[in-house]
Image: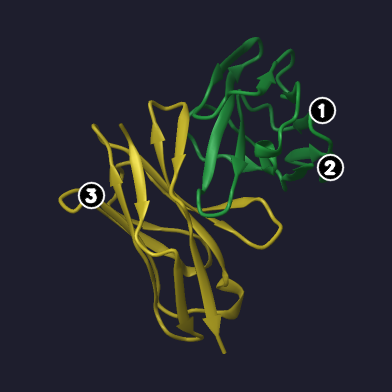
Chain colours: A yellow, B green
Amino acid sequence: AQSVTQLDSHVSVSEGTPVLLRCNYSSSYSPSLFWYVQHPNKGLQLLLKYTSAATLVKGINGFEAEFKKSETSFHLTKPSAHMSDAAEYFCVVSVNGNKLVFGAGTILRVKS
Amino acid sequence: NAGVTQTPKFQVLKTGQSMTLQCAQDMNHEYMSWYRQDPGMGLRLIHYSVGAGITDQGEVPNGYNVSRSTTEDFPLRLLSAAPSQTSVYFCASSLKGGQPQHFGDGTRLSIL
């Protein structure tokens, strides 16, 4: 069965330093993977998606993620954190084309 | 372009009451879905629909009913509310299943 594990429930960084949010997935075939962001009291917004075209995926707001099949990982990174990046981030895998399975989420805190 | 619209934004119910959460999208998307979000558990799929007249169960369907009589609307019904259904509910849509989804802003439901 497909599943997603986000390795950190909370990550805290200082403004201007790099961000790394870790995600491992389990899938019996080549998956479609997504990262979503949720700001407080808001819905979810797509950051980026992987659909096998390229292993390094660039998203909005300077975020990118690298698909590593050998490590079954899809970590999200950003070179320099901004205060507005503080939010909850979800790693998501698509199952059978009709269902999304969400990780438990990582809350990113950005310190000034 | 309104995107995905959910109503109401907040609701308090008593145990045993019934309620319908409304979801409408104006993007002519075939795929629509309902999720519930609980702390530390990410989003879990309740029901989904791949087109008008077609619905299917997700991960946590018990206690919820759906119907899809039009492409635009996908209401979620709680027939007899229970405290365990206290949650934030999100509706989402996409052009097809497996593609990035557009989310509404959520309905915060409390059941006493």
Q: Report the residue marked by disc 3.
A: A72
* Crowd class of label 3 (few under 14; some 14 to 19; many from 20; radius 10 Å): some
Which circle, 3 or 1, is nearer the viewer?
1
Tell me residue B67's x, y (percent): 70, 16
Q: Which residue is identified by label 2? A: B11
**Residue B19, relative to residue A91: is it above or below?**
above
Label 2 SS: strand
Q: Residues within 10 Å of mark 1 (few under 14, many from 20)?
A: some
Q: Is residue B83 above or below residue B58?
A: below
Q: Nearer the viewer, residue A68 or A72?
A: A72
Q: What is the distance, in whole Å, between disc 2 and disc 3 at their CAs?
A: 41 Å
Q: Residue type at mark 3?
A: Thr
- Residue at mark 2 shares a chain with residue at mark 1: yes
Tell me which label, 2 or 1, sits earlier in the chain.
2
Question: Gap in Å between the C-alphas at discs 2 and 1?
Answer: 9 Å
Could you tell me if the residues under marks 2 and 1 are in contact, i.e. CB atoms within 8 Å? yes
* Marks 3 & 1 on one chain: no
Q: CA distance from mark 3 to mark 1?
A: 41 Å
Residue type indicated by callout 1: Met
Task: Provide the residue designation for mark 1.
Answer: B19
Q: Residues within 10 Å of mark 2 (few under 14, many from 20)?
A: some
Q: Chain of mark 3?
A: A
